[in-house]
Amino acid sequence: MYIETISPAQIRESVFWLNRARQDGGAIYSRYTETDDSITVQNTTISGNRASRFGGGWFDASTGLNTWLYFSTVNANRATEGANIAADAMRVVNSIIANPLGGSNCRTALTLEGVNVIFPASCGGGIAADPLLDALRDNGGQTRTHALRRNSPAIDAAPDDCPLTYDQRYFLRPIDGTFDGVARCDVGAYEYLAIAAPVREPMPLTEPLIPPTPTRSPPVARADCESFRATSPRDGLPNGVVTFYWDAAPGATDYRIVIFNETQQQVGMYSVAAPATTVSADVSQGAIGGGISFTYEVQALVNGQAVCRSSVTLLRESPNVPPPAPQCGNGIQEPGETPNSCPNGY
Ligand SMILES: [Ca+2]
Ligand SMILES: [Ca+2]
């Protein structure tokens, strides 16, 4: 996409992937020249794009500080320099810039505001931790997104008073993703544990989005988490159907079991309405994949929002033990025993 001197230019709730540029700006090449111009990329994912020189994801040639990357995820773009972003003056707010390919993450330091997860360290600061992004895929909504894996440092990392009410998918934000009773927005374009908004209500495009108007985070609905606890299984995860049991969280409307593999990638999810406190699920290798260690998290939900959790990490139980080898002389004709193999009796 090429943007030049359109004020204000806004790109929102979008995905750019697998685009390619011969020189600069694999997905976006932008430039504004007038001081009242602005370019905003918000609630958007820029992933897997490629430029042969600068800015595999985004090349911005503007010189003022009116180019904004806002609540967006820029991941795994490729270029010789600034593999994700090449810009002289860009404001990055509550975003993820991660996993550049072929060159540096950012070509030069950017103006970082709020909380940003920048991995590996580059771009002039931010939290230099792996954001634990899942592969780009359909996670609901109209566009592909990088889901955040469990324990991602991006979860609930944005400052209080998040101005957004939904993520790239039009799923509601903020959601309490850390179960501390405080709903904060996640940084980047994706909100962990979010649910689809009942009505899609895009903001009017004529309104400038920056600077945002802060609004109070809505209170999180509560259930009594005191005695809520996953009770079974606790010894091992069978390779087949298992029944999960837990102690109730009074006030919960639903429960959910989420299964993660060793890389914290979600590999299974099963739901049941309260007051049930059990659910059976196929957790065989065919259903949730291979691996020797899994974590399941039981979540108590109030009207779709997870409010309590209890997790257990288990090893995969060994496959069924083969029956003992037949033994002559025990008085039983076991499979494989013949008069010839047991001349002195079964
Ligand atoms: Ca959150
Ligand atoms: Ca929280």
Image (cartoon, rainbow, N blue to C red):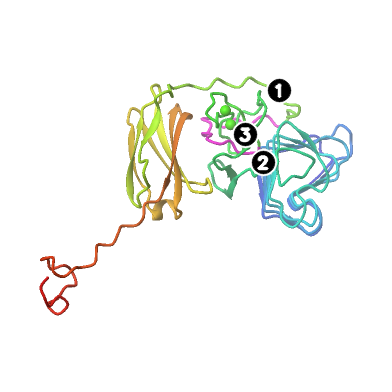
Q: Is residue 94 above or below residue 75?
A: above
Q: Give the residue drawn at x 72%, y 26%.
A: 212
Is 127 situated left or right of 35 in this image? left
In the image, ligand 1 is in what quadrant? top right
Q: Disc 2 vs disc 1: Cβ atoms closer than 8 Å?
A: no
Residue at disc 3, CB closer than 8 Å to ligand 1? yes
Q: Is residue 47 above or below residue 64?
A: below
Instruction: Tell me where residue 285 appears, x and y as whole percent.
Output: 40, 54
323 within the magenta span? no
Q: Which amino acid does label 2 sit on?
A: Thr
Sort mark 1 into few (<14), some (14-19) or many (20+) by Cα contacts within 10 Å.
Answer: few
Quick one: 327 or 72, which is closer to the camera? 327
198 within the magenta span? yes
Q: Give the residue drawn at x 65%, y 24%.
A: 160
Span highlighted in magenta in the image:
188-205
Please report whichever mark, 2 or 3, sits nearer to the chain's N-terminal start: 2
Q: Distance between the residues labelled 3 and 1?
A: 17 Å
Please report whichever mark, 2 or 1, sits nearer to the chain's N-terminal start: 2
Quick one: 285 or 325, which is closer to the camera? 325
Residue holding disc 1:
213
Instruction: Determine if residue 1 is in view.
Output: no
Q: Is mark 2 on a helix, strand or loop?
A: loop
- Quadrant assignment for the C terminus: bottom left
Q: What element carries label 1?
A: loop
Q: Give the residue drawn at x 65%, y 26%.
A: 162
Number of the label disc, if any, that sits on residue 121: none
Residue holding disc 3:
186
Number of the label disc, if any, that sits on residue 44: 2
**Quadrant position of residue 67:** top right
Instruction: Tell me where residue 289 appears, x and y as whole percent.
Output: 44, 54
